[in-house]
């Protein structure tokens, strides 16, 4: 039953414990991307629906089945973004970024939305990080994009759990020939196809190849292969990508059945699969989209991109038991007893923080017992105790929580003393 006190199906809250992982992923991803010269971009959570239809293609699952589309009061049709490339490419055109030195390198890290059937690793709101390299067609960029994603997985400690799959989808010319060959192959087999594939045969026969229905799957295995239609230029491009990857020591599997779900890809496509589960729950994928910007009304601009799913990455980090970097947990708890001590305590907390220490306290509990209980919960290595007697003596108690020992120091010395203790 739907309850307003529950998150909607397929969505979840991100609590402080989740952010320990999310922050780790974000920092790791951003470090690599910034070292590489990427700049961050954020596009609106919703765009005109037509942008996604024109970018991904009307037969793409994320448009046909999974789009969160809605109309405004004035009847304009919008949709929550199901993926990041459409918005970034729209922004590239809108802001005239083709006038900047090329390639333009942009990254994002944001929630995306797909009205999919929720299951393990598949949500309706999920985080993706992604990057786009726009304005260059050289295969060295394809290899670098793949190496970048691989490097991020290495930094996150999950690279050995993933297998890199690559394929070439060819250019518009190869695809036109291949589509025609597919239509010919399926011409007298139409009745054996599922309903969706029957309608897709006209509009986008390539999509028939990744249908999961048993009969369609069987027919797809007998259908002509895209590799037979790859033109010499596309072939050379792919051979160079593979050569660069070999040079970089990145192992990959050539996968002639890898098509990705969206229309806009050309030439190189790649995905990182779970070493054990395969295509199910891939952690990320990407590829070239050399014709997309022109198709959307911008100048002729080759480009490529990649997107990784953060929830799935985090699930790998947990399974691999990667130890996260030390947290920024508080180091000092300050228990202030009585009104005057509270006033002094607030100032002292500020001084400790300004001196670079992480300090909490003066949280409203009044008895010593209740405050020490709180200190226990924060698990700070030190607690400072400031009561009326200490104030009268111009002193403060420092309690070492691990050892259970305590000492009294002069109030004006405490910041210096604590700094020294925490350094040890
Ligand atoms: P895609 O471009 O559809 O291959 O998505 C790129 C990556 O985003 C995938 O490899 C997943 O890691 C992640 N992803 C896509 N859809 C979902 C979803 N519904 N829930 C969680 N992660 C997703």
Image: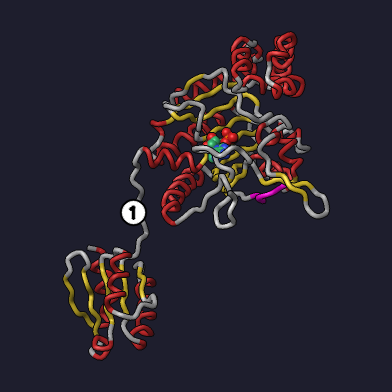
What SS does tag 1 mark?
loop
Task: Reply above or below: 223 against 375.
Answer: above
Stretch in magenta? 43-47
| Residue at screen point 32% across, 65% down | 378
| Residue at screen point 65% across, 28% down | 265
**Rendering coords of residue 18 (x, y %):** 44, 51
Task: Reply above or below: 414 against 212.
Answer: below
Task: Reply above or below: 179 against 334.
Answer: above
**Rendering coords of residue 374 (x, y %):** 32, 70
Report the magenta stretch's main SS: loop
Task: Reply above or below: 324 against 348.
Answer: above
**Rendering coords of residue 30 (x, y %):** 49, 47
Residue picked out by circle 1 = 326
Give the quarter of the figure containing the C terminus: bottom left
Tally the numbered discs.
1
User: Is residue 281 left or right of 105 when viewed as pictured?
Assistant: left
Report crowding for label 1: few under 14, some 14 to 19, many 20 or more residues within 10 A (C-alpha). Answer: few
Tell which residue pokes out farthest to the bottom in this image. 392
**Figure coloring:** secondary structure
Residue 22 seen: yes
Q: Quadrant of residue 221?
A: top right
Residue 290 seen: no
User: Is residue 136 left or right of 334 when viewed as pictured?
Assistant: right
Q: Nearer the viewer, residue 109 or 151?
A: 109
Does the magenta run of residues contain 44? yes
Quadrant hosting ligand 1: top right
User: Is residue 136 left or right of 354 when viewed as pictured?
Assistant: right
User: Is residue 220 left or right of 75 when viewed as pictured?
Assistant: left
Q: Nearer the viewer, residue 201 or 358?
A: 201
Does the magenta run of residues contain 284? no
**Rendering coords of residue 397 (x, y %):** 23, 78
């Amino acid at each position: 039953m739907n309850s307003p006190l529950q998150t909607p199906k397929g969505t979840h809250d991100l609590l402080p414990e989740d952010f320990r992982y999310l922050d780790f992923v974000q920092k790791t991803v951003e470090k690599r991307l910034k070292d590489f010269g990427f700049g961050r971009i954020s596009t609106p959570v919703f765009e005109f629906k037509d942008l996604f239809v024109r970018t991904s293609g009307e037969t793409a699952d994320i448009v046909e089945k999974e789009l969160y589309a809605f109309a405004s009061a004035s009847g304009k049709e919008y949709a929550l973004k199901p993926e990041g490339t459409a918005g970034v490419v729209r922004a590239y055109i809108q802001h005239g970024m083709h006038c900047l030195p090329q390639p333009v390198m942009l990254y994002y890290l944001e929630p995306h939305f797909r009205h999919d059937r929720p299951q393990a690793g598949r949500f309706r709101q999920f985080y993706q990080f992604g990057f786009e390299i726009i304005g260059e067609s050289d295969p060295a960029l394809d290899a670098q994009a793949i190496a970048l994603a691989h490097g991020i997985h290495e930094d996150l400690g999950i690279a050995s759990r993933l297998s890199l799959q690559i394929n070439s989808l060819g250019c518009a010319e190869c695809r036109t020939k291949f589509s025609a060959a597919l239509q010919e192959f399926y011409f007298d087999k139409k009745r054996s196809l599922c309903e969706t594939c029957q309608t897709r045969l006209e509009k986008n026969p390539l999509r028939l190849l990744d249908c999961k229905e048993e009969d369609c799957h069987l027919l797809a295995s007998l259908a002509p292969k895209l590799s037979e239609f790859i033109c010499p230029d596309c072939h050379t491009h792919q051979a160079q990508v593979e050569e660069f990857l070999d040079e970089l020591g990145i192992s990959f599997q050539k996968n002639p059945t890898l098509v990705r779900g969206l229309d806009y890809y050309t030439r190189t496509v790649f995905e990182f699969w779970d070493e054990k589960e395969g295509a199910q729950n891939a952690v990320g994928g990407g590829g070239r989209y050399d014709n997309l910007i022109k198709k959307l009304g911008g100048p002729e601009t080759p480009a490529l991109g990649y997107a990784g799913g953060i929830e799935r990455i985090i699930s790998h980090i947990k399974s691999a038991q990667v130890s996260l970097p030390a947290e920024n947990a508080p180091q000092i708890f300050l228990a202030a007893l009585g009104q005057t001590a509270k006033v002094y305590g607030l100032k002292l907390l500020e001084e400790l923080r300004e001196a670079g220490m992480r300090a909490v306290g003066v949280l409203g509990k009044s008895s010593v017992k209740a405050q020490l209980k709180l200190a226990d919960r924060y698990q700070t290595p030190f607690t400072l105790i400031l009561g009326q007697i200490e104030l009268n003596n111009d002193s403060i108690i420092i309690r070492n929580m691990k050892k259970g020992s305590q000492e009294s120091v002069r109030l004006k010395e405490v910041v210096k003393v604590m700094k020294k203790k925490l350094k040890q």
